[in-house]
Image (cartoon, rainbow, N blue to C red):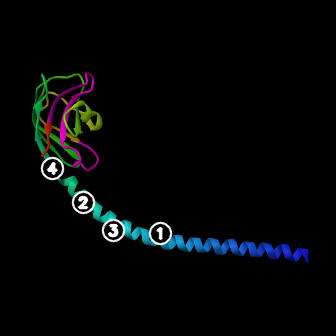
Amino acid sequence: MRKTAIPAAAILALSLMLSACSGAATDTTSSESTAPESSTTETEAGTDTDAEMMHEEHTGTFEGAGEHSVAGTVTVSGTEIVLEGYSSDEGPDLNIYLTNGNDEDAVAGGMQIDAVAYDEASQTFTFDAMDVSGYDTVVIYCDKVKAIFGSALLS
């Protein structure tokens, strides 16, 4: 009788575990099938908005900062920054940044794009698609001497 009780208990325990697993799997499956539908809808709506923001262009005109001279115009989209009629004082390590403002803190919290040549009137910087609407200024900054050479407020 003892031999029969152990296999019966094992079968009962196995049955309970399998039914518990199948119930959890059913619940998970139904939750998963519901979740992607709402996520997909949100993603599709978000993608349209993101795509619109990435194609939006913002422009500005450079002004020098302090004793430095920077001139020209800038156009920013979701995938590139284009400088036209650009000129700047020479600096040892000039870089272009997307920022919110034109001070040291704004540069520190901004996004460095690339090195910029002081003597090339037309320059284009490309980057992965991103929402640039969160930035309101393009800054020319010398990383080596920690100096802002100029900036352009975007509109």
Judged from the image, the secondary structure of the residue bearing numbered disc 2 is helix
Place of residue 96 in the rendered image (x, y in percent of width and height, measured from the top left): 22, 34
Quarter where residue 115 is shown: top left
Place of residue 21 in the rendered image (x, y in percent of width and height, measured from the top left): 63, 71
Q: Please report whichever mark, 1 or 3, sits nearer to the chain's N-terminal start.
A: 1
Place of residue 57 in the rendered image (x, y in percent of width and height, measured from the top left): 15, 50
> Do the residues bearing badges 1 and 3 touch, measured as CB atoms within 8 Å?
no
Judged from the image, the secondary structure of the residue bearing numbered disc 1 is helix
Mark 3, residue position: 41
Quarter where residue 113 is shown: top left
Amino acid on which the number 2 mark rests in the picture:
Thr
Amino acid on which the number 1 mark rests in the picture:
Glu
On-image quarter of the N terminus: bottom right
Residue 81's label in the rendered image is none
How many angstroms separate mark 4 from mark 1 (CA)? Answer: 39 Å
Mark 4, residue position: 57
Q: Residues within 10 Å of mark 3 (few under 14, many from 20)?
A: few
Vertical relation: 11 (above or below) 127 = below
Residue 32's label in the rendered image is 1
Specify the segment rendered in magenta.
126-151
Mark 2, residue position: 49
Vertical relation: 55 (above or below) 154 = below
